[in-house]
Image: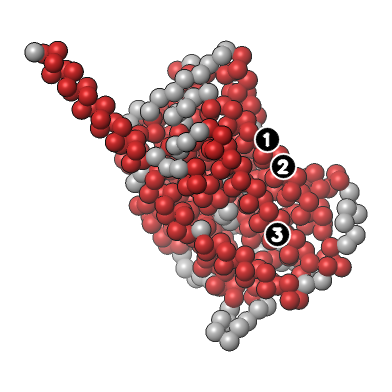
Amino acid sequence: MQNRKNFVRKIVQESGRRRRMKNNSITPRQLFFVIIQTQIGVGILSLPFTLFTKAKTDGWMSVMIAGVLIQFVILMIWLLMKRFPGSTLYDVIPLLIGPAAGKVLNALYTIHFIFVSVLILMYFHQITGRWIFPETPKWVMISCVALTSGYLITSSARIIARFFIIMTPLLIVLFLLIAYSYTDAHLLYILPVGVHGMKNVLVGTQDATVALLGFDAALVFFAYTNGKPEKKLKAVSLAALCVTLFYTYVTFTTFIYFNSEEIIIVPEPVLYMLKAFSFKVIERTDLVFMSLWLVSVATSFMSYLFIAAKGVQSVLKLKHHKKTIPYLVFTSIILATIPKSNLQIQQWGKYISLSGIIFTIPIICLLLIIAVARKKQGGNAQYEK
């Protein structure tokens, strides 16, 4: 009789587990939009200026080269996660390097993703404080974004993906607003192509790669995605390609709108370009653009904070990531208010960007090598939680 009760209990538990897995999973199409919304963030406004300081008018080529490099990194991420279906990076690491070392590396990844979230908040206030709310206290602006974003990510990955899909059409509006600048563009500003040398273009590739980070969200969201592994790879690769083309388009457009003497003195050339436009019903086009840009900042922040929450859940062995969100939001707000000057924010950005490259490229390569060498593979149902 007792065996019969245990058997029935297992059937009920398995049925509940499958139901939660179904409710929390996303499709490859939804994964496509998650990656796009994670990649497009604060970097879109200042990237053209940064690339011009390194590669001059050939900076748009740096974005394309970075896009090619990213495709190889995505392939490595896919090869690693393909060996552990249904697992996040936090599940894979202990299996490859052992429980003790795995817990330490998981903690480092979690800290990294927390600081990426903090950096997004810093850049957000730096730009909005300069353009819209110069007298508003920093903690007020940062708290508005952090608290509203934190509320959304207490839900499942499916709810987050649906929200990202709803917000994606706003990117089309951004595209069209920038396209209006071609009414006063000068292709001669970008000629001759390649005159500044391939060395400078490759130097600019590092900054372009940092701006395009966000595809690393696949390290966690792969576990939530249904479908064949090939469809998951296609979704992430296509998303990264779209973002690369979009950033190349923005960079190229600013280079043919401003001449070399102008662009070097405008840290956010996209906003300065849009500020020059006015319509009968819209006086400040740059403010309209920033209103839409704010959504992209929020979605990028949501994605990274969700990944960090999953890291805390894994390290502390919690049943759900929801309990960690209030603490992560509060921590992000406190850390984002620490830098008091633009120079300090630049220093934070420099170190966090460097850690982003380290955690995304060499460490993932090393983990893939270990998995192949030790013939490790497997899977679990972590994504049901």
Q: Indicate the secondary structure of the residue bearing disc 1.
A: helix
Tell me the kind of residue under disc 2. Val
Q: Which residue is mark 2?
A: 68
Q: Which residue is mark 1?
A: 72
Distance of mark 2 from mark 3, alpha carbons?
A: 16 Å
Q: Tag 1: Cα neighbours inside 10 Å, few (<14), some, or many (≥20)?
A: few
**What is the quadrant of residue 122 in the picture?**
bottom right
Residue situated furthest left in the rendering: 1
Q: Which mark is residue 249?
A: 3
For the N terminus, the quadrant is top left
Q: Indicate the secondary structure of the residue bearing disc 2.
A: helix
**What is the quadrant of residue 99 in the picture?**
top left
- Please tell me which residue is depicted at 34% across the width and 35% down the height of the picture: 21
Question: In the drawing, does residue 368 fall left or right of residue 295?
Answer: right
In front: 368, or 10? Answer: 10
Compare marks 1 and 3 and give the one earlier in the sequence.
1
- Please tell me which residue is depicted at 49% across the width and 30% down the height of the picture: 89
The colour scheme applied to this rendered structure is: secondary structure
Q: Percent x, y for residue 304?
A: 49, 44
Q: Tell me, yes or no, if residue 338 can be seen here.
A: no
Tell me the kind of residue under disc 1. Phe
Q: Badges 2 and 1: C-beta atoms under 8 Å apart?
A: yes
Q: Tell me, yes or no, if residue 78 can be seen here.
A: yes
330 vs 368: above or below: below
